Image (cartoon, rainbow, N blue to C red):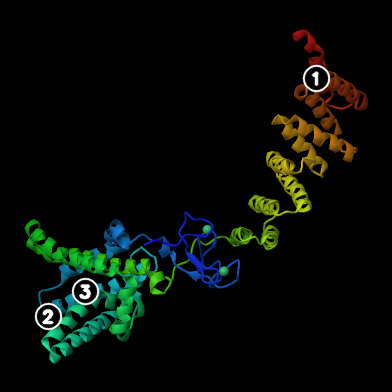
Amino acid sequence: MTKETCKLHPARPSVWHCDHCRHGLCTECVPGSRENHDGNLPRCAICNTELRYLGAANLAEPFWTQAHRLFGYPLQANGLIVLVMMGVVAALLPASFIGLIGLIMLFAFSVHYGLNVIEQVRNGDMTPPSLSEILKQQGEWLFFKQIGVFAVLGAFVYAGMRVSPGLGVLVLLLVLLAAPAATMMLAMTRSVTESVHPVKLAALMIGIGPSYLLLWICLATVGAAPMLVGPLLQEMLPEQVLFPAGMVVSSYFTFVTYAMMGYILYEKQAALGFASNDEFGETLEGRTFLVRKGIADARQLAAVGRHEAALETLVKAINIDQSNAELREFYYRVVSAMDDEEALRRNTNSICDFFVGRQLPYKAAQYCQETRKRFPDFVPAEARTCHLVAERFFEEGRYKDAAQLLMSLHRMAPKYPDMFAVLLLMARIFFEGMNAPEKASALLKQIRTRYPDHPELPKVERLLEVISYRPATA
Ligand SMILES: [Zn+2]
Ligand SMILES: [Zn+2]
């Protein structure tokens, strides 16, 4: 069976589906948990329809590949406590009528516990219920309901027999086939009427599909395991502990079968038309959630060409988290996908200022360069940004770009406070980058005249010295 994948991330299974747009979305495209969404279903970023939850089940592996988790299930702390408790109680039961009552109560507890196992596993919770959790549930009468279900199913067989033996056998086979479905239904609905309803049981079995037969075979096999293990125990253990040990072993296998039933409901929840009551996904801190959602929605809008709407969404997110670089970068991506030169120039200025402000001039240089590839005359409007990007270009060996930026800066902002550094950098570009030592020394001499008291004047002197040595070393 192929699983639907995310429209934007084809390698990821979809967890959400928009019935209107007919596409699936992954957890990155629909971030956050039930709590983040205030208990509501999230809406499609494109058409605002409520999304349908496919459940984390779409991420779930088929149950027959989960043997290690299912057989390990009762061996986790809570499960072990319950198993040990059952063994201890079994050991303490006297061989009398009271002991028999105790045994029945133990059996009732095991059924009650097992139905809770189904319910929890079905909701994606692979931790066994704790003893105290179970003992807190009063008035559920699950054991009697389970007996009720089997009594009604037995009555069906009896009624069939009354009509004709052939029909009786047929009904018996059907009842045997439907028994796990009835148990699962009881765990989910806690209603005897629903759990013996032939149409509902048929719907459940058909919804699970061929896997139901596989589940049935697994349940029968695992359910029979204690009978195989029993004789072994008889040989290995002294008679006094045989009964409690048998109780522990058979309870272990029983809980595995309950976990199997819960898991198949979890796995097939989308086909069965209910979403598990799980948390959707990881709960994110409020602001983080809004930012993640902003990016995810904008990505979907941009993917269908709705760039303006994508930008609006991003602006909202930026207002929530001014310092988030990912939002700024995605904003730049969306603008550069649009055919709007003015907007791209404006946004390049803004992203360059942003990264210079965050002491990341190399990022500013990267975006400046990207825009310059399309519009070679682009120069950052802000003088300091222009200076730091030019410095970065110089370090990267982009001498022509750096020179162009510095010349523009000199022309546009003659009063720039760090003009000394700008001119010195220009001189280094002449000398190191453009192989023009005469131009460099002429500029350096100008700097010396213009800033006779500048504290960094020695740098100018040193460079002049280097330049004047050069012919000798050549
Ligand atoms: Zn939609
Ligand atoms: Zn996705």
* Crowd band around label 1 with a 10 angstrom C-alpha radius: few (<14), some (14–19), many (20+): some
| Viewport quadrant of the N terminus | bottom left
Residue labelled with disc 2:
97
Q: Nearer the viewer, mark 3 or mark 2?
A: 3
Q: Give the secondary structure at mark 1.
A: helix
- Amino acid type of the residue that numbered disc 3 sits on in the rendered structure: Leu
Residue 87 visible: no
Distance of mark 3 from mark 1, alpha carbons? 92 Å
Q: Nearer the viewer, residue 209 or 258?
A: 209
Distance of mark 3 from mark 2, alpha carbons? 14 Å
Q: CB atoms at circles 1 and 2 under 8 Å apart?
A: no
Among the 4 quarters of the image, the one containing residue 461 = top right
Residue drawn at point x = 21 percent, y = 85 percent? 151
Among the 4 quarters of the image, the one containing residue 360 = top right
- Amino acid type of the residue that numbered disc 1 sits on in the rendered structure: Leu
Residue labelled with disc 3:
106
Q: Give the secondary structure at mark 2.
A: helix
Residue drawn at point x = 63 percent, y = 62 percent? 301
Distance of mark 1 from mark 2, alpha carbons? 106 Å
Q: Give the secondary structure at mark 3.
A: helix
* Crowd band around label 2 with a 10 angstrom C-alpha radius: few (<14), some (14–19), many (20+): few
Residue 425 visible: yes
Q: Nearer the viewer, mark 1 or mark 2?
A: 1
Which of the two labelled residues, at mark 1 and mark 2, occupies the earlier sequence position? 2
| Disc marking residue 463 | 1
Residue 134: x %, y % from top left: 33, 73
* Crowd band around label 3 with a 10 angstrom C-alpha radius: few (<14), some (14–19), many (20+): some
| Viewport quadrant of the C terminus | top right
